[in-house]
Image: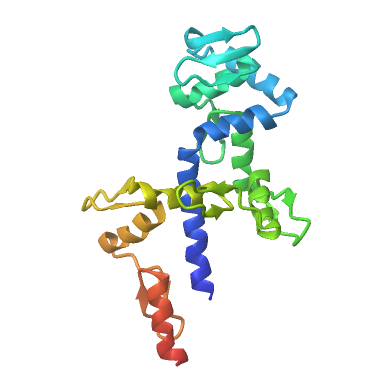
Amino acid sequence: MAFIKEESEDVKIEETFTVKQEDLQEQTDLIEENEESKEEEHHVKIEEKTHLQTDGILKRKDNKRFTCTQCGKSFKRKGYLKIHMMIHTGEKPFTCTQCAKSFSCSSHLNQHIRIHTGEKPFTCTQCGKSFSQSSHLNLHMRIHTGEKPFTCTQCGKSFNCSSNFYQHMRIHTGEKPFTCTQCGKSFNCSSNLYQHMRIHTGEKPFTCTQCGKSFSQSSSLYIHMRIHTG
């Protein structure tokens, strides 16, 4: 049903933000592996002009690798390390002219700009669905291939994306990192906190098209709809 799909999309978006926070190291890996050399040279030139305060924590390793003294991660170019260091410094020199949101590297800004332009240049060859980022297309392709590369070492269950894997792992660890600022209750995933907050805000975004009654959760609306459908 349409209202179920709506909440599912909200949850996916919410989980995506969570993953971005959890996978900062993975993001820098993608920068090193996927950024084109011309784009990277552009980053380096800009970053050198902005006089980033990171030179004091850079060091050369084996004349080939540059190593971060904060976390030990190493890179083949000084430019990659400077981009990585922004994770530690919090520096975000690339700003969107549409909404003023800032980013640590220009490639992330370019991806963000597509939200405003609506551009979706990455298209699935199987079903024709388009995406604004290649990573989103790669994730989508696993629906067609059935690939589930993230496997739990505790129970062997596999997942097609890291966000679902991380959420699952909290079942084993008992971790509940998402805490309600109103009552202190904690949750193992951000979507559950998001739903819980409606208790405090009184928000009821799911409305019955038959009688106009509203609900805080799609599952409650689904149960209610049986009154009308029999």
Q: Quadrant of residue 90?
A: top left
Q: Which residue sits at x=48%, y=11%?
A: 57
The spot of residue 143 in percent (x, y) is 66, 59
Residue 40 vs 222, above or below: the answer is above
Residue 230 vs 130, above or below: the answer is below
Asked whether, in this view, residue 154 is left or right of residue 213, the answer is: right
Residue at the extreme left of the image, as rendered: 183
Residue at the extreme bottom of the image, as rendered: 230
Count of all numbered marks drawn on residues in the image: 0
Q: Which residue sits at x=50%, y=37%?
A: 23
Q: Quadrant of the C terminus?
A: bottom left
Q: Which residue sits at x=58%, y=9%?
A: 61
The spot of residue 8 in percent (x, y) is 50, 63
Q: Which residue sits at x=25%, y=53%?
A: 185
The spot of residue 193 in percent (x, y) is 34, 55
Residue 50 vs 5, above or below: the answer is above
Q: Nearer the viewer, residue 166 or 83?
A: 166
Q: Nearer the viewer, residue 91 or 171?
A: 171
The spot of residue 84 in percent (x, y) is 54, 24
Asked whether, in this view, residue 56 is left or right of residue 80, the answer is: left
Residue 71 vs 132, above or below: the answer is above
